[in-house]
């Protein structure tokens, strides 16, 4: 009798689950060493074997989970018949006005002059109202235009937009549309001149069709607001890459203006399928929907669920994220009961709220934190050279190669930089490497002859602010992780004298009212970031906190879930039990916890606080053990597959898996509704013995929480990150921080792969 050894036994007494040594070593280097419930058994599984194994859906502040449900725009437009009737009515009104003017011209000259004389009589009240908006001399000059055949009057600057609008309307009514007004280009003055037949007719037409270029405010108000909100659905792509691409494709304003025109609440994973809300300022839904098709569309992304609203989105405008994670090749004794016990433990006591490995860079151990250290040390040149470091082995490859073309181009660009070939470096660097592209384009624009030196600080400041701030935040996160581990080693269950909690008493210290920028902002991870200016008063504190006394500890009022720890800065309070640790950690990098102010504002952070433990949002977490799950089997459908069919995949073929039919065009067959088909196969036993056991975890986490850290607590070191065999093989770089200079292997794509779970 034959049997298949791959068939999973859910009640087996298998050996303890394997541990991924590379991951454990990387976690230790980033201060991640402790568990809240270390005695519980764990299990192992491969994370992100396919990018469709990691689904992230944003949760809005009202609790709604964002899904892509519709890519059309018909619901935004009135029925064609209504629109046609409205246009016909507008045409009739314009023709009626034109016929009226023709009749006026045919009237006897005396009657026309009598009417004009009556129109020339402007009421005293209107004249006074106009003078209040500008001055009496200007108003008299406007009245004189009625008797002139040509000429114009320019008012003094009217700074208030509302006042300018009132002036336009008042001139129109007071002078019976015989004078027309336009705002000066590049100024706030208003030009007033006589209206002729053509200008008056055009003015009426323009008002009927919604203003010049159809973009007046009243038109947007009718739609619902000046911001078109939409769902951005993407597969295996970085949020910032697409956010920067949309303005270019739509030929929106460039640079910072483009970034301000497109807003979002937070960035999401790269190797994943994600859905989130974005908002585009004064862009019609039809234009955005046009990016879903044709050669001018966006690869591996779709836009939908359009609606107009009067407000933008800001970083942090979300409640959290829902994660649906498929862990493959799972192993562990009593697997199902082990998984459920782990979930119950987190529900009860929580998990260590560490900053995940993604916070510190992709290829190198704590890479972004290393750059942050250099910035805090004001070592600008070393910081630039670390950002631009590359692996020489990339340039030594010979076809056929599995390296991406972008990775090779980046290495070539960095090599050219160290060879002082500025223009070549700027031309070669791919757009997706945002920090490198900013640096290399700066040096190409401001290059200096050899020996005259380069302005490395100015180059760093050319990097987008949220990205350059991320480096120092990563260093703060590294120190915070070490502090959390030290605190859990002191006690995993009890509060201690000197622990910090958020203050809730009226006499608790509060942030100084006059502190510049005292209100916290949020970075792309959803982290609260305080960026008060270095010259802020000494009384500034990042938040109102309270150090527990012996009486507080004895009262039983507080639990470990209430404890907070600070990231290092000059506006926070350090907990007494851990002050020696903070001091020694910063001293290792030549820094002093009590001297953290810097002359460069972006790198002078007051610090902030973060809770030691975290839990599931709304207690939401379910698990399913799936036996016989072959690699090509996808237990959970993506949003796009629910819309267009199970075979639909935009992000390219899965590494080691099968490429979905109609990839990129959504033409896959839906079959039984796909997910229903997979469920039927599992229930009927098809596929068992043909694959390995998978565990599907569906959980909701709040802003700034890392799903990988929740999985770590569940699996007790059993998380095995999938490593594609690209060029450098499967070795995890965990031997220490990167060296600086041209021969170093630098941290890459700091933002590209970071799990933006806020």
Image: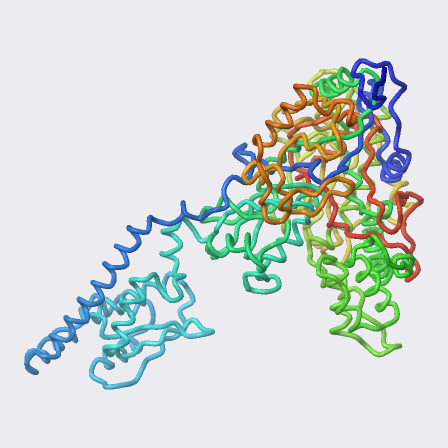
Q: Residue furthest front?
A: 1
Residue 695 is at least partly visible in this image: yes
The quadrant of the image that shows the N terminus is top right
For residue 441, what is the image quadrant? bottom right
Which residue occupies 36% across, 51% down?
A: 222
- Which residue is drawn at the image coordinates 92% and 54% (left, top)? 739
What is the count of numbered marks?
A: 0
Whether residue 518 sits left or right of residue 559 in the image: it is left
Percent from the top left, x then y, of residue 707? 72, 33
Q: Name the residue rendered at 73%, 52% in the picture.
A: 469
The reply, left or right, for residue 425 in relation to residue 451 is left
List x then y, in percent, for residue 695.
73, 25
Q: Is residue 195 above or below residue 717?
A: below
Position of residue 560 relative to residue 658, above or below, is: above
Quarter that holds the C terminus: top right
Q: Nearer the viewer, residue 663 or 738?
A: 663
Residue 629, image x and y in percent? 74, 27
Looking at the picture, does residue 344 appear above or below residue 636?
A: above
Q: Is residue 223 left or right of residue 314?
A: left
Say how the picture is coloured.
Answer: rainbow
Nearer-the-camera pick, 612 or 539: 612
Q: Is residue 714 visible?
A: no
203 or 664, nearer to the observer: 664
Residue 41 position within the rendered picture, expressed as x and y whole percent measured from the top left: 83, 19
Residue 158 vs 738, above or below: the answer is: below
């Amino acid at each position: 009798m034959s049997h298949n050894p791959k068939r999973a036994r859910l009640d087996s007494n298998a050996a303890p689950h394997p541990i991924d040594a590379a991951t454990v070593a990387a976690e230790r280097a980033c201060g991640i060493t402790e568990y809240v419930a270390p005695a519980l058994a764990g299990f192992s599984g491969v994370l992100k074997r396919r990018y469709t194994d990691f689904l992230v859906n944003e949760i809005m502040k009202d609790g709604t989970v964002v899904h892509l449900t519709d890519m059309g725009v018909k619901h935004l437009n009135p029925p064609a018949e209504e629109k046609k009737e409205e246009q016909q009515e507008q045409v009739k009104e314009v023709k009626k006005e034109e016929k009226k003017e023709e009749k006026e011209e045919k009237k006897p000259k005396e009657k026309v002059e009598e009417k004009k004389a009556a129109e020339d009589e402007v009421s005293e009240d209107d004249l006074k109202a106009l003078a209040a908006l500008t001055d009496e001399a200007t108003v008299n000059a406007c009245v004189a235009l009625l008797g002139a055949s040509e000429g114009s009057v320019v008012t003094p600057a009217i700074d208030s937009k509302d006042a300018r609008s009132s002036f336009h309307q008042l001139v129109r009514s007071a002078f019976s549309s015989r004078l027309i007004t336009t705002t000066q280009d590049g100024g706030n003055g208003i030009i007033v001149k006589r209206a002729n037949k053509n200008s008056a007719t055009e003015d009426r037409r323009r008002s009927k069709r919604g203003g010049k270029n159809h973009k007046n405010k009243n038109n947007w108000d009718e739609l619902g607001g000046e911001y078109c909100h939409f769902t951005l659905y993407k597969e295996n792509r970085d949020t910032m890459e697409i956010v920067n691409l949309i303005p270019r494709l739509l030929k929106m304003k460039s640079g910072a203006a483009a970034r301000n025109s497109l807003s979002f609440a937070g960035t999401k994973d790269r190797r994943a399928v994600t859905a989130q809300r974005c908002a585009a300022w004064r862009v019609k839904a039809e234009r955005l929907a046009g990016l879903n098709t044709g050669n001018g569309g966006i690869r591996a992304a779709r836009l939908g669920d359009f609606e107009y609203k009067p407000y933008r989105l800001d970083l942090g405008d979300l409640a959290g994220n829902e994660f649906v994670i498929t862990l493959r090749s799972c192993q562990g004794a009593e697997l199902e009961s082990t998984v459920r016990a782990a979930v119950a433990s987190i529900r009860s006591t929580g998990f260590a709220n560490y900053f995940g490995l993604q916070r510190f860079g992709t290829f190198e151990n704590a890479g972004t934190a290393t750059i942050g250290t250099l910035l805090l040390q004001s070592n600008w040149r070393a910081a630039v050279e670390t950002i631009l470091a590359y692996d020489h082995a990339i340039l030594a490859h010979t076809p056929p190669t599995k390296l991406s073309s972008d990775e090779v181009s980046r290495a070539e660009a960095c090599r050219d930089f160290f060879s002082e070939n500025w223009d070549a470096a700027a031309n070669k660097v791919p757009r997706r490497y945002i920090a490198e592209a900013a640096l290399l384009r700066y040096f190409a624009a401001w290059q200096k002859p050899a020996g005259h030196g380069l302005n490395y600080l100015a180059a760093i400041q050319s990097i987008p602010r949220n990205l350059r701030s991320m480096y120092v935040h990563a260093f703060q996160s590294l120190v915070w992780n070490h502090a959390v581990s030290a605190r859990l080693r002191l006690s995993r269950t009890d509060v201690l004298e000197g622990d910090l909690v958020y203050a809730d008493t009226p006499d608790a210290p509060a942030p100084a009212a006059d502190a510049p920028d005292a209100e916290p902002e949020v970075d792309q991870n959803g982290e609260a970031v305080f960026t008060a200016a270095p010259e802020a008063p000494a009384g500034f504190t990042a938040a109102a906190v309270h150090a527990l006394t012996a009486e507080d500890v004895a009262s039983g009022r507080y639990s470990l879930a209430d404890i907070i720890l600070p990231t290092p800065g000059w506006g926070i309070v350090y907990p007494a039990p851990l002050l020696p640790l903070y001091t020694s950690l910063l001293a290792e990098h030549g820094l002093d916890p009590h001297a953290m102010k810097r002359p460069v504002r972006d790198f002078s952070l007051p610090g902030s606080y973060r809770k030691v433990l975290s839990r599931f949002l709304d207690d939401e977490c379910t698990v399913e053990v799936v036996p016989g799950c072959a690699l090509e089997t996808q237990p959970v459908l993506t949003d796009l597959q629910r819309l267009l069919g199970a075979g639909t995949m935009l992000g390219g073929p899965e590494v080691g898996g099968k490429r979905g039919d109609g990839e990129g065009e959504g033409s896959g067959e839906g079959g039984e509704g796909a997910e229903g088909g997979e469920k039927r196969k599992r229930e009927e036993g098809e596929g068992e013995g043909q694959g390995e056991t998978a565990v599907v975890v569906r959980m909701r986490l709040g802003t700034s929480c890392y799903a990988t850290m929740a999985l770590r607590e569940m699996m007790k070191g059993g998380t095995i990150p999938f490593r594609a065999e690209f060029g450098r093989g499967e070795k995890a770089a965990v031997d220490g921080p990167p060296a600086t200079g041209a021969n170093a292997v630098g941290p890459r794509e700091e933002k590209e792969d970071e799990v933006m779970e806020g």
